[in-house]
Image (cartoon, rainbow, N blue to C red):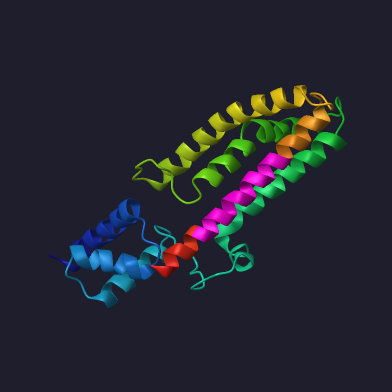
Amino acid sequence: MSNISKEKKLAQTLIQIIKEKKPQNVKQLTNLIKEKLPIPEQEILELILKLQDEGKIRLAKPLPASPKLATYLKTEHALWYWVTIAIVIAAFIVVFTIPEGLYPWIYIRYGLGTILVLWLPGYAFVKALFPRELPIEISEKSLDTIVRIALSSGMSLALVPIVGLLLYYTPWGLQLTTTVLSLLAITIAFATAGIIREHQSQLLKTKK
Protein backbone atom coordinates (compact mmCIF):
# COMPACT_ATOMS: atom_id res chain seq x y z
CA MET A 1 0.00 0.00 0.00
CA SER A 2 1.40 3.43 -1.00
CA ASN A 3 1.92 6.20 1.53
CA ILE A 4 -0.83 8.30 -0.09
CA SER A 5 -3.45 5.55 0.08
CA LYS A 6 -2.37 4.67 3.62
CA GLU A 7 -2.76 8.29 4.72
CA LYS A 8 -6.12 8.55 2.96
CA LYS A 9 -7.40 5.42 4.72
CA LEU A 10 -6.18 6.73 8.08
CA ALA A 11 -7.86 10.10 7.45
CA GLN A 12 -11.15 8.40 6.58
CA THR A 13 -10.94 6.24 9.71
CA LEU A 14 -10.14 9.26 11.86
CA ILE A 15 -13.08 11.31 10.55
CA GLN A 16 -15.43 8.32 10.88
CA ILE A 17 -14.39 7.80 14.51
CA ILE A 18 -14.97 11.47 15.30
CA LYS A 19 -18.50 11.27 13.83
CA GLU A 20 -19.44 8.00 15.53
CA LYS A 21 -17.57 8.06 18.86
CA LYS A 22 -17.34 11.84 19.44
CA PRO A 23 -14.10 11.70 21.48
CA GLN A 24 -13.65 14.48 24.04
CA ASN A 25 -9.94 15.03 23.45
CA VAL A 26 -6.99 14.11 21.24
CA LYS A 27 -5.87 11.34 23.61
CA GLN A 28 -9.21 9.55 23.35
CA LEU A 29 -9.18 9.95 19.57
CA THR A 30 -5.64 8.56 19.34
CA ASN A 31 -6.54 5.52 21.45
CA LEU A 32 -9.64 4.81 19.35
CA ILE A 33 -7.61 4.91 16.13
CA LYS A 34 -4.92 2.64 17.59
CA GLU A 35 -7.63 0.11 18.43
CA LYS A 36 -8.58 -0.08 14.74
CA LEU A 37 -5.25 0.40 13.00
CA PRO A 38 -1.72 -0.62 14.11
CA ILE A 39 -0.18 2.82 13.51
CA PRO A 40 2.39 4.69 15.66
CA GLU A 41 0.96 7.43 17.86
CA GLN A 42 3.26 10.07 16.39
CA GLU A 43 1.92 9.39 12.90
CA ILE A 44 -1.64 9.70 14.15
CA LEU A 45 -0.91 13.03 15.86
CA GLU A 46 0.73 14.40 12.73
CA LEU A 47 -2.35 13.51 10.67
CA ILE A 48 -4.67 15.10 13.24
CA LEU A 49 -2.73 18.37 13.01
CA LYS A 50 -2.71 18.17 9.21
CA LEU A 51 -6.48 17.65 9.00
CA GLN A 52 -7.01 20.54 11.40
CA ASP A 53 -4.81 22.81 9.26
CA GLU A 54 -6.84 21.79 6.20
CA GLY A 55 -10.08 22.62 8.04
CA LYS A 56 -11.44 19.07 7.84
CA ILE A 57 -11.61 18.72 11.65
CA ARG A 58 -11.61 21.24 14.49
CA LEU A 59 -9.97 20.66 17.85
CA ALA A 60 -11.65 22.34 20.78
CA LYS A 61 -9.51 24.10 23.34
CA PRO A 62 -8.93 21.80 26.33
CA LEU A 63 -10.69 22.63 29.58
CA PRO A 64 -8.99 22.72 32.98
CA ALA A 65 -9.14 19.44 34.87
CA SER A 66 -11.95 20.64 37.17
CA PRO A 67 -13.13 24.03 35.89
CA LYS A 68 -15.25 26.19 38.14
CA LEU A 69 -18.50 27.52 36.69
CA ALA A 70 -17.00 31.01 36.35
CA THR A 71 -14.08 29.54 34.38
CA TYR A 72 -16.36 27.39 32.25
CA LEU A 73 -18.42 30.46 31.31
CA LYS A 74 -15.30 32.01 29.78
CA THR A 75 -14.63 29.07 27.44
CA GLU A 76 -15.95 28.48 23.94
CA HIS A 77 -18.15 25.71 25.34
CA ALA A 78 -20.35 28.39 26.93
CA LEU A 79 -20.60 30.50 23.76
CA TRP A 80 -24.13 29.27 23.09
CA TYR A 81 -25.21 30.60 26.51
CA TRP A 82 -23.88 34.11 25.93
CA VAL A 83 -25.33 34.23 22.40
CA THR A 84 -28.72 33.20 23.78
CA ILE A 85 -28.61 35.86 26.49
CA ALA A 86 -27.47 38.52 24.00
CA ILE A 87 -30.25 37.73 21.51
CA VAL A 88 -33.00 37.66 24.13
CA ILE A 89 -31.87 40.98 25.62
CA ALA A 90 -31.57 42.51 22.14
CA ALA A 91 -35.09 41.32 21.30
CA PHE A 92 -36.40 42.81 24.56
CA ILE A 93 -34.79 46.19 23.83
CA VAL A 94 -35.86 46.30 20.18
CA VAL A 95 -39.49 45.38 20.91
CA PHE A 96 -39.87 48.30 23.31
CA THR A 97 -37.77 50.90 21.48
CA ILE A 98 -38.81 50.49 17.83
CA PRO A 99 -42.44 51.60 17.38
CA GLU A 100 -44.87 50.22 14.82
CA GLY A 101 -44.58 51.88 11.44
CA LEU A 102 -40.93 52.90 11.75
CA TYR A 103 -39.59 51.48 8.49
CA PRO A 104 -37.22 49.80 7.74
CA TRP A 105 -36.26 49.33 11.43
CA ILE A 106 -39.54 47.61 12.16
CA TYR A 107 -38.24 44.55 10.30
CA ILE A 108 -35.52 44.15 12.95
CA ARG A 109 -38.26 44.14 15.57
CA TYR A 110 -40.23 41.55 13.63
CA GLY A 111 -37.16 39.36 13.15
CA LEU A 112 -35.95 39.37 16.75
CA GLY A 113 -39.52 39.13 18.03
CA THR A 114 -40.08 36.01 15.93
CA ILE A 115 -36.88 34.43 17.26
CA LEU A 116 -37.91 35.28 20.83
CA VAL A 117 -41.33 33.69 20.41
CA LEU A 118 -40.72 30.75 18.07
CA TRP A 119 -37.23 29.53 18.96
CA LEU A 120 -35.33 30.85 21.99
CA PRO A 121 -37.60 29.55 24.81
CA GLY A 122 -37.63 26.07 23.30
CA TYR A 123 -33.88 26.10 22.61
CA ALA A 124 -33.10 27.06 26.21
CA PHE A 125 -35.57 24.43 27.48
CA VAL A 126 -33.97 21.68 25.36
CA LYS A 127 -30.53 22.75 26.61
CA ALA A 128 -31.75 22.51 30.20
CA LEU A 129 -33.13 19.00 29.62
CA PHE A 130 -30.28 17.67 27.46
CA PRO A 131 -27.21 19.86 28.09
CA ARG A 132 -24.68 17.82 26.12
CA GLU A 133 -26.29 15.09 24.04
CA LEU A 134 -29.80 14.39 22.87
CA PRO A 135 -31.38 11.06 23.93
CA ILE A 136 -31.41 10.04 20.26
CA GLU A 137 -28.72 8.06 18.49
CA ILE A 138 -27.31 10.46 15.88
CA SER A 139 -24.18 9.72 13.89
CA GLU A 140 -23.68 13.12 12.28
CA LYS A 141 -22.92 16.33 14.17
CA SER A 142 -24.91 18.29 11.60
CA LEU A 143 -27.92 16.05 12.24
CA ASP A 144 -27.61 16.73 15.97
CA THR A 145 -27.84 20.46 15.21
CA ILE A 146 -30.85 19.97 12.92
CA VAL A 147 -32.64 17.86 15.54
CA ARG A 148 -31.95 20.48 18.22
CA ILE A 149 -33.37 23.21 15.98
CA ALA A 150 -36.49 21.15 15.27
CA LEU A 151 -36.97 20.31 18.96
CA SER A 152 -36.40 23.94 19.92
CA SER A 153 -39.09 25.16 17.53
CA GLY A 154 -41.50 22.49 18.71
CA MET A 155 -40.92 23.22 22.39
CA SER A 156 -41.33 26.97 21.80
CA LEU A 157 -44.67 26.35 20.10
CA ALA A 158 -45.68 24.34 23.18
CA LEU A 159 -44.31 26.72 25.83
CA VAL A 160 -45.51 30.08 24.47
CA PRO A 161 -49.26 29.20 24.52
CA ILE A 162 -48.87 27.91 28.09
CA VAL A 163 -47.22 31.17 29.12
CA GLY A 164 -50.00 33.12 27.41
CA LEU A 165 -52.69 31.05 29.13
CA LEU A 166 -51.11 31.57 32.55
CA LEU A 167 -50.75 35.31 31.96
CA TYR A 168 -54.42 35.53 30.95
CA TYR A 169 -55.46 34.49 34.45
CA THR A 170 -53.06 36.82 36.27
CA PRO A 171 -53.92 40.35 37.45
CA TRP A 172 -51.61 41.79 34.76
CA GLY A 173 -53.37 40.05 31.89
CA LEU A 174 -52.09 39.01 28.49
CA GLN A 175 -50.30 42.08 27.16
CA LEU A 176 -47.21 42.77 25.07
CA THR A 177 -45.17 43.86 28.10
CA THR A 178 -46.08 40.89 30.28
CA THR A 179 -45.61 38.42 27.42
CA VAL A 180 -42.16 39.70 26.45
CA LEU A 181 -40.99 39.88 30.06
CA SER A 182 -42.24 36.35 30.73
CA LEU A 183 -40.51 34.93 27.65
CA LEU A 184 -37.31 36.76 28.58
CA ALA A 185 -37.46 35.39 32.13
CA ILE A 186 -38.09 31.75 31.20
CA THR A 187 -35.49 31.80 28.42
CA ILE A 188 -32.78 33.15 30.74
CA ALA A 189 -33.85 30.73 33.50
CA PHE A 190 -33.76 27.67 31.22
CA ALA A 191 -30.47 28.76 29.59
CA THR A 192 -28.87 29.26 33.01
CA ALA A 193 -30.10 25.84 34.14
CA GLY A 194 -28.69 24.39 30.91
CA ILE A 195 -25.21 25.88 31.33
CA ILE A 196 -25.09 24.76 34.98
CA ARG A 197 -26.05 21.19 34.03
CA GLU A 198 -23.55 21.22 31.17
CA HIS A 199 -20.81 22.33 33.57
CA GLN A 200 -21.75 19.61 36.06
CA SER A 201 -21.69 16.92 33.37
CA GLN A 202 -18.26 18.14 32.29
CA LEU A 203 -17.01 17.80 35.89
CA LEU A 204 -18.31 14.23 36.03
CA LYS A 205 -16.45 13.36 32.81
CA THR A 206 -13.17 14.77 34.09
CA LYS A 207 -13.46 12.70 37.27
CA LYS A 208 -13.87 9.42 35.35
Q: Say whether residue 71 is magenta.
A: no
Left or right of 122 in this view: 113: right
Residue drawn 84% across and 26% down? 171
* Position of the C terminus by quadrant: bottom left
Q: Quadrant of the N terminus?
A: bottom left
* Quarter occupied by residue 105: top right
Picture layout, residue 37 above or below residue 177: below
Q: In this view, does 115 lie above or below 38?
A: above
| Corner quadrant of residue 67 | bottom right
What is the total number of numbered labels drawn onto the structure image?
0
Q: Along the line of sight, which residue is nearer the eye, 139 or 166? A: 166
**Which residue is rendered at x = 69% and y = 29% of the image?**
163
| Residue 99 % position (x, y) | 87, 30
Residue 16 visible here:
yes
Q: Is residue 93 above or below residue 203?
A: above
Q: In the displayed image of the protein, which residue is found farthest to the left?
A: 1
Nearest the viewer among 58 and 145 is 145
Residue 59 visible within the image: no
- Front one among 200 and 61: 200
Magenta segment boundaries in residue numbering: 185-200
What secondary structure characterizes most of the magenta part?
helix
Side of 173 where 33 appears, left or right: left
Task: Tell me where residue 69 appears, x and y as whole percent.
Answer: 60, 64
Q: Does the magenta stretch include residue 188?
A: yes
Residue drawn where x is 81% and y is 25% of the image: 175
Left or right: 35, with 123 as reference point: left
Please say if 144 is above or below 37.
above
Residue at (50% x, 33% y) in the render: 150
Q: Position of residue 133 (x, y in %)?
A: 44, 48
